[in-house]
């Protein structure tokens, strides 16, 4: 997305530069025609290249300076947006609702690589095992090796048994007819690079 914006701004600035150059040339030619008419002003002969080169060079420098300033502003704004969006995704990972998970999964296809990475970390932190087919699908569509490996690693991590599941599978059961609770959302620790979920403190009695 950002390269397209930069190209559009550059083309617009180049178009403005062309208009300024044509306008300057027309004014010079009009002044020369007036001096050639009978009764018109007589212009002192001077090198036309020198007369035209200086204004055009100055206008070009101004246009280029403005273009660089515009690009710098856009890059700064984009950096701030990326940081803000990644922080928002990690906040969504602390929730338990379907809307938060959907918002996280949507950003897995964001054009910005850093936002995609933040979305993957948030998805793993959310801890819903049902998203693994979607992660596998994205991994199959991704050509970049590093990003593909990260998606597959997230799938493997989510498919690991949680501590509760591990203990339930190894601890002796006193009542074989008592079923174990089966949940999609798992808690198996902290994904590298993320923070553990914060739980609200309970008020202790006196």
Image (tube, rainbow, N blue to C red):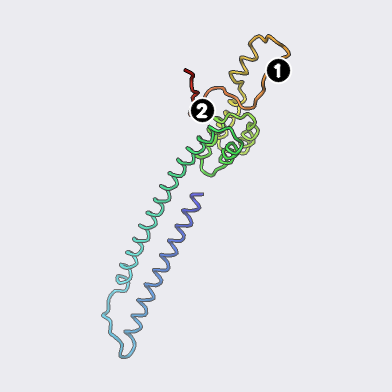
Q: Nearer the viewer, residue 205 or 174?
A: 205
Residue 20: name its quadrant: bottom left
For the point 42% across and 66% down, which residue is it?
Answer: 18
The residue furthest right is: 177
Label 1: state its secondary structure: loop
User: Along the horizontal axis of the image, is 180 left or right of 122?
Assistant: right
Residue 65 position in % (x across, y down):
35, 57
Residue 175 position in % (x across, y down):
70, 10
Q: Residues within 10 Å of mark 1 (few under 14, many from 20)?
A: few
For the point 34% across and 88% down, which residue is it?
Answer: 37
Q: Is residue 181 visible?
A: yes
For the point 50% across and 27% down, which residue is it?
Answer: 200
Residue position for label 2: 197
Q: Nearer the viewer, residue 195 or 117?
A: 195
Q: Earlier in the sequence, mark 2 or mark 1?
A: 1
Q: Is residue 117 visible?
A: no
User: Along the horizontal axis of the image, is 152 left or right of 88?
Assistant: right
Residue 192 position in % (x across, y down):
50, 26
C-alpha gap between disc 2 and disc 1: 28 Å
Q: How many marks?
A: 2
Residue position for label 1: 179
For the point 42% across and 68% down, which residue is it?
Answer: 19
Label 2: state its secondary structure: loop
In the displayed structure, 109 sits above or below 58; it is: above
């Amino acid at each position: 997305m950002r390269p397209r914006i930069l190209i559009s701004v550059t083309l617009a600035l180049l178009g403005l530069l062309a208009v300024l150059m044509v306008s300057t040339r027309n004014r010079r030619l009009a002044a020369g025609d007036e001096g050639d008419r009978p009764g018109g002003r007589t212009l002192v002969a001077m090198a036309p290249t020198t007369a035209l080169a200086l204004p055009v060079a100055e206008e070009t420098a101004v246009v280029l300076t403005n273009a660089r300033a515009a690009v710098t502003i856009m890059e700064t704004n984009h950096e701030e947006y990326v940081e803000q969006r990644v922080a928002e995704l990690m906040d969504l990972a602390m929730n338990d609702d379907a809307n938060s998970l959907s918002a996280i999964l949507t950003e897995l296809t964001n054009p910005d690589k850093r936002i995609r990475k933040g979305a993957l970390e948030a998805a793993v932190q959310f801890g819903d095992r049902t998203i693994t087919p979607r992660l596998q699908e994205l991994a199959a569509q991704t050509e970049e090796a590093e990003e593909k490996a990260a998606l597959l690693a997230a799938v493997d991590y989510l498919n690991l048994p949680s501590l509760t599941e591990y203990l339930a599978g190894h601890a002796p059961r006193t009542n074989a007819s008592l079923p174990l609770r089966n949940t999609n959302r798992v808690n198996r620790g902290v994904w590298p690079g993320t923070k553990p979920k914060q739980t609200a403190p309970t008020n202790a009695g006196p």
